[in-house]
Amino acid sequence: MSVVGEYGRIAQQQDRSATFELIRVLSDPAVSAADRDELGDVLGRLGDVRAAAPLAAIGLDRDRPAEVRQVALRVLENSAMCPEGARWRAWWNAGDDLVRGCLLRQAERTEADLLEPVARDPHHPLHRHALTGIEFGFEEPRWQQYKIQGLDHPDPGVRRTAAEVLYWEEPVAAEQALHRTADDRDTGVACAAIETLRCYHSRATLRLLHELAQGDDERADAARDSQDDLLGSFQCEQRSILGWLAPVADLLGPPEFDAATSGDASVPDTRELIVPVAAQIFSTYSDPDGAWAPKLDALHSYHWIGVPTADRVGLATFLSGHPDPQVRASSCRALSTWHEVDLLLALAHDPDVSVRKSAVYYLRFVPRSHEIATLSWDLVDSGEVAGTRGYEALATCAAHTPPGELDDRLIELARTDFRESIRAEAVSQLAHRIEPVLPVLTESPLVTWAVHIRILSACREQGLRPPGIGALRDVDNLDLAVALAGFDDVSGAHQSL
């Protein structure tokens, strides 16, 4: 098929009929750089698993032009088709820095032994790629320090990457460094820091963004966007912590009491419940070509509980064994609905990380099982998961463990684990027995104030008044101030910026 002039349609529909022709054109060294980049974007949108092998062949071929290889590797990266496990290490051991950069950006915690030496070495030629790789799922304080140190790197490309990757985890320790970087001599670096600061909910950051927004350059434009976003969060809390907000009251305007009390009327969901027909599912998802955007969207909306019992086994086997990991991941909701535990357990060991994540999450909703409790606990205990995957695995373990039986392990996690997502989830699961972790309130935050806020929430639910929270009232953090408002009048707290 001819793909000339069809890129927009192919990408929008995820028309995989074009996959191999796009790869053929991408391989042509005569294609312009602009066209090659566009081809790469389209192939990335397709997410066609059949493209993985030919794209890998291009990306690994050192005899091809570097710019062609780079686009092929970028497609694998953007469509989550980079290798994992033994194949990741095989690619790494080939010693090709072009490939290694891609691998670092997509590394999992199982590759931390190779990722960390590059992330902590500012002189390593691939340092910037390692910082990108630790943006998600590497939440312990030492990983945050590697990102923060990157803000002082002599290379503006590294500084910009460091500013960008501090967006997701929002470590408290990064805030002052980001304030400095917002004044970086490189405009791109400064704007990246300003964009990231929209996630740092402090009065000092709000004031800084306001000051930066007074200009008429690119930095001021970025500051106005971030300030508007941050203002929304602050204005939503004016009624509950009016005194705490006094130092920035001139930026917030008067509280909108009427708007706060009226609320938004809920809109009923009028979507038709579509029960999938087995024969149609087999036909539709057996065809690797055609428009896949509607196919994948449909998997998220089907009313699986309405499928006749007689059709479920065949559908479950078909969907869980589908060659496309996006289909396998989406099938986990159906498998959970039908209590297909064995298939979900198999998918929890799938070669694809997104499928494993989905399976572990949906195992939470099947009947209690010691096997599931063991699997999910071993996953948490191994240290191989953090972030969303970490707290989902711990929540699944708690759902499959008899009440109280997990408490001692949860207390230990809440007190000593270095993964903030795990600590926070442990606190949430311990809401009925929160007293043993109250000393954490007197400690500095590991990464953010999330664990302290979870403990305060649990205390409020249990009717407990935690001791020693006075020092927390001096902290310049909106979310913590809101959490404290439930215990005492914080209007008299220190309000200096």
Image: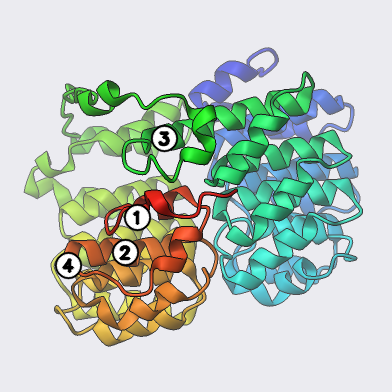
Place of residue 246 in the rendered image (x, y in percent of width and height, measured from the top left): 47, 39
Secondary element at image label 1:
helix
Q: Secondary structure at mark 4?
A: helix
> Mark 1 or mark 2, which is nearer the start of the sequence?
2
- Residue type at mark 4: give it: Gln
> Can residue 481 be spotted in the picture?
yes
Q: Earlier in the sequence, mark 3 or mark 2?
A: 3
Q: Looking at the image, is 203 positioned above or below residue 449?
A: above
Q: Secondary structure at mark 2?
A: helix
Of 141 and 6, which appears nearest the observer?
Answer: 141
Give the alpha-carbon distance from disc 2 to disc 1, as whole Å.
6 Å
Residue 154 left/right relative to 407: right
Which residue, given by chain and number where applicable, does mark 4 sit on? Answer: 462
Tell me whether the residue at label 2 lies in contact with that at label 1, contact meaning CB atoms closer than 8 angstroms: yes
Q: CA distance from mark 1 to mark 3?
A: 52 Å
Please name whichever residue, 34 or 59, is drawn nearer the observer in this view of the structure: 34
Give the distance between the C-alpha atoms of the residues marked 4 and 1, in whole angstroms. 14 Å
Label 4 CA crowd tier, 10 Å (few <14, some 14–19, many 20+):
few
What residue would you read off at disc 2?
456
Q: Which mark is residue 483?
A: 1
Residue 25 pos. (x, y %) = 76, 29
Image label count: 4
Q: Residue at x 63, y 43 (%)?
A: 196
Q: Please name which of the two marks, 1 or 3, marks the residue nearer to the observer.
A: 1
Of 426 and 487, which appears nearest the observer? Answer: 487
Mark 2 and 4 residues: CB-CB less than 8 Å, in contact? no
User: Of callouts 3 and 4, which one flags the residue occurring earlier in the amino acid sequence?
Assistant: 3
- Give the residue drawn at x 38%, y 74%: 468
Disc 1: CA contacts within 10 A as few (<14), some (14-19) or many (>=20) = some
Kindly give the residue lying farthest to the top in the view shown. Answer: 5
Q: Which mark is residue 287?
A: 3
Upstream in the sequence, badge 2 or badge 4? 2
